Amino acid sequence: MRLDLTGKVALVTGSTQGIGQAIAAGLARAGATVAVNGRKADGVAATIESLAGQGEFVAAPGDVSTDEGAAQVLAAVPHVDVLVNNLGIFGAESPLEISDDEWRRYFEVNVLSAVRLTRAYLPGMTERGWGRVQYIASDSAIATPAEMIHYGMTKTSLLAVSRGFAKFAAGTGVTVNSVIAGPTHTGGVEDFVYQLVDKDLPWEQAQRQFMREHRPQSLLQRLIEPEEIANMVVYLASPLSSATTGGALRVDGGYVDAILP
Ligand SMILES: NC(=O)c1ccc[n+]([C@@H]2O[C@H](COP(=O)([O-])OP(=O)(O)OC[C@H]3O[C@@H](n4cnc5c(N)ncnc54)[C@H](OP(=O)(O)O)[C@@H]3O)[C@@H](O)[C@H]2O)c1
């Protein structure tokens, strides 16, 4: 199976590190020109430098959780064929202590940024009769963690947003899907793991303890590597996935205990 994205332009939000960066690299290796996004121009430039030799990249800095930041990104990349709404923040907070402002911030960063960019880029895709929109959701969309209800809420919302926009784009040649990522080995997650286990443990032990105590449902029994999420995203971005739309596809290491996706 050859996944060929030659001639396509992709935008991956929050791609200066972690899963987003792996997705950006994967799409570029498949032939797409990939717009790298993060809040700061220097961070984006450093990421593009670190990805040298893996394909074509352009810089699209901007805080997409704000109108101004999204406008900056739109100006940098007015034409997008593959939109990957990857940006997402997470962290443990007591459900009884988290403030209203923090709830709003989670909604704006994790949900509204994706809705805003979908509204901006979907019309161009439908006019051209081809496009791919994806949302990076999480096992927390389905199995709400008690220590981050605010985060689970945003990821459940993305599944609804994704399904809704897939219906809106019915029959246009544009597919819209979400990817349910499971616990993945990224820098952000290393910090999160150390919020929940003994800070003095070396990483391998900390990871095992975290999976045993906080994610015992994982059939993989290890964290997922970012490239393993990226592989699904690249497939869904490719012309070969043309009959898959309105779906929520799992790359969760079997974490969600369900037969159907
Ligand atoms: N890691 C996991 O285990 C896991 C599991 C399931 C789902 N997910 C989901 O996968 C996605 C990526 O997670 P990750 O762990 O790879 O994230 P991460 O390592 O924390 O990276 C976050 C990225 O978002 C960027 N960013 C943060 N705020 C931004 C904003 N307002 N505008 C633009 N960019 C912004 C950061 O870049 P700058 O700092 O340069 O701005 C960075 O590139 C998220 O949606 C997350 O919910 C992750």
Image (cartoon, grey):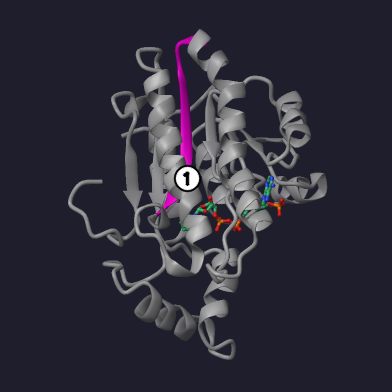
Q: Secondary structure at mark 1?
A: strand
Does 209 appear above or below 58? Answer: below
- Residue 73 lies left or right of residue 30; in this view the side is right
Residue tagged by mark 1?
136
- Residue extending furthest top? 127
Residue projecting furthest to the left: 259
| Residue 25 included in the magenta stretch of the image | no
Q: Quadrant of residue 208?
A: bottom left
Bin the neighbour count of mark 1 within 10 Å (Cα to Cα): few under 14, some 14-19, many 20 and up: many
Chain part drawn in magenta:
128-138
Above or below, 239 against 187 in this view is: above
Which residue type does callout 1 highlight? Ile
| Quarter occupied by residue 70 | top right
At 62% from the left and 38% from the top, the residue drawn is 113
Q: Is mark 1 within 8 Å of ligand 1?
A: yes
119 or 60, which lies in front? 119
Residue 14 shows in this picture = no
Percent of width and height locating residue 41: 81, 44
The answer to whether 57 is drawn above or below residue 198 in the figure is above
Q: Which quadrant of the rendered structure holds the N terminus?
A: top left
Instruction: Kindly report the secondary structure that dominates the magenta region of the rendered protein.
Output: strand
